[in-house]
Image: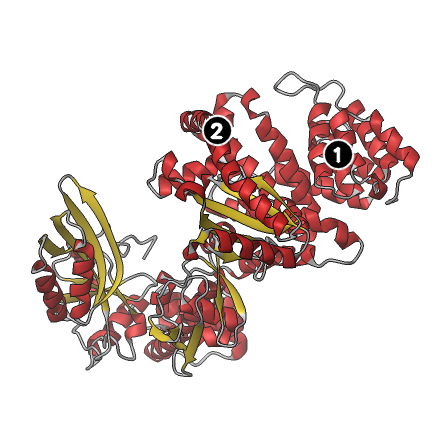
Amino acid sequence: MATTATAERVITIRGFPRPLARAMEAYAERLDVDAIREAYELAAEAHSEQRRASGEPYINHAVEVATIVTSLQLDTASVVAALVHDVVEDTVVSLQGIREIFGDEVASIVDGVTKIGKVRFRSSTERQVENYRKLLLSMANDARVILVKLADRLHNMRTLEYLPVGKQKPIARETREIYAPLAHRLGMAAIKWELEDLAFKFLDRKAYDDLRKLVRQRRRARERHIQEMQRPLEDALEAAGVTAEVTGRPKHLWSIHRKMVTQDRSYDDIYDLMALRVITDSVQSCYAALGIIHGRWTPIPERFHDYVATPKSNMYQSIHTTVLGPSGRRYEVQIRTAEMHRTAEFGIAAHWRYKDEGGDSGVDDALTWFRQVLEWQKEASEPEEFMEFLRMDLFQGEIFVFTPKGEVKQLPVDSSPIDFAFSVHTEVGLHCAGAKVNGRIAPLSRKLKSGDSVEIMTNPRQWPNRDWLGFVKTSRARQRIRQWIRREEYDRALRIGQDFFQRELRKARRRKPSNDEMRKGARRLGYKIFDEVLAALARGDIGPAAVIRGLYPDEDPSDVVQRTPSALERIAEKIRKSNRGVAIGGVDNLMVRYSQCCQPVPGDEVIGYITRGRGISVHRTDCPNVLNLDEDPGRRVEIEWKTERDDRFFVHLYMEGTDRRGLLGDVARTISETATDIQHADMRGTDGGMTAAFVVEVQDLNHLKRVIDAVNRVKGVTSVIRRESFGESELFDGKKG
């Protein structure tokens, strides 16, 4: 398809609807106007008898989508696809017809947009995963598919009010949860903000209208405050010889509303409503402008971010700073070059022109994430796991931390040293034994902040544990940890299964099967290899009698001993006969789970319960859920505590007290003085008082009692108790356990 246009063609552009013509004129020399005209005429003819819900001709929608696409200055194929994107689905024109007229490139984009349009995201988890896979696959192959789809969704949201009310909210919710985050991931801030504001409008109309009214009422005052800062800043930049454009920066309604809700603040308290943007002609001028601003107004240190030196993963670059401006008001200032501004507004679309010329890798870099997500989908063992990976990476903000050598690592907000370790190398993460943050020893659960310098200490004997999953934030770390745990559990189950199987063979007086018999037996039982059968045997997923029948289908079953114990009974027997019992914290502890419904610690009277496929669950004997054990006494196991000195156990504490300043800090300090780590703390005010919940790590029951006694002595604390239960046990439902 041609990529040039003559001066005559620029004149013919005026034959298009005016908004589309104006958008095309901005870069007409890179467009094949004849091809776009042909697409426009085809779409107008194909949609001639159709109308939108608003009553306007359907072709108007195609033109509006194409106008949005051209405002992004995408290539000819994208503009053509935008014009005919609904033709295949809604008219007699086929995809093959599109291919014959406009070529494979346009047909591929149209096909991708059509398929995304059929995706319904609010369905069962399994279906959601498949729908996301289709969406991401289309994007990973050609980013123009999602760019055209975002333009399509944007215009549909602009006209959503014409649809029945019952259809508005599902579409708006899908827009907020799927398309706005995708626009953000692609760096397309202009589209992201508009999608979020439109979704807000239809999801919470009263809050939207109230906030919009409030913003309009304060508009003149806000503009006056902006000018109080803008004019002196322009004068200072001009005096220093820095070429720059200074403008007020509007805040978007959804952004304001979200801050008011999450920070529990009023409209007047959201200080960065006073926002300015400085557009310069070079990177050097950006830093010169920063120096001028900080030299004249007092900067707020914790509100400074340099995304020019360390760009975000979606290609965003800008310097952010907040200063105390005129009258002591806080002003948020963004400083960037004109090219950075275009990238900030249009993201991957701003780089597309350079991709065609072979001079920019931004598009390919931006698509790396989508391709990585597809790899996660292949490796995830459960649909829920993939959805968790996707949510973590699609919706989180970023921080920037440093290696000891000064290299920058981008991580999600609240990432831990474990996340940092896995970002360095998988082996570093797997053997992470400790961390230093800014030169000081820090817990592995420490929440990192931008600017932190992180050093990881490794030990070849250190391996991941399940506790890490409670605080890691990156999908990479979570995936690698789960892979290791699954592999370790599989290997352990395989060893136990081999032991069980050998005993069953002897008990059934059967000969050892050949490799061929094991291979065929595995297939008869629905497994790929016999090792999977042995692991399933250990987990209790299959009984020993079924395994033997699968191995020797043609032999007389009367040769088998009349009754053989089940795999569940064999596990119980193995535990009962062990002279060490269940060595909690010892070599067998990998088969043990501590129930979260009662959270036992050494010193509690406990009982074991053999779950289906998840090892032994340890409960306190006074746990309400233990009553269910009577329904299946064969699964009970008498156990005793045998802990190692360094073992620690999580316990939830619930505290009530007076609402005095500093109480939570005093309690936290008191707990720390008992040599106890706090994993989580949450405080809420009540009428005349407060409540708090803590998760602490203790060694045993005596340790826990010392903590409770110490907290009870803190001034203002009226009571502190150990929570007895946190909901239904997950261990007694056969579907879960």
Say whether residue 85 is visible: no
In front here: 316 or 237? 237
In x, y percent, where is residue 228?
50, 38
> For the point 38% across and 38% down, which residue is it?
260
In front here: 293 or 39? 293
In the image, 430: left or right of 357?
left
The quarter of the picture where the N terminus appears is top right
Mark 1 falls on what kind of element? helix
The quarter of the picture where the C terminus appears is bottom left
In x, y percent, where is residue 6?
91, 39
In x, y percent, where is residue 286?
61, 55
| Quarter of the figure with residue 4 | top right
Q: Residue furthest front?
A: 239
Q: Residues within 10 Å of mark 2 (few under 14, many from 20)?
A: few
Tell me the distance, in whole angstroms, between the alpha carbons under discs 1 and 2: 30 Å
In x, y percent, where is residue 727?
23, 50
Give the labeled residue for mark 1: 23
| Quarter of the figure with residue 283 | bottom right
| Vertical placement of residue 15 versus 661, above or below | above
| Vertical placement of residue 364 versus 555, above or below | above
The amino acid on which the numbered mark 1 sits, given as a three-letter code, is: Ala
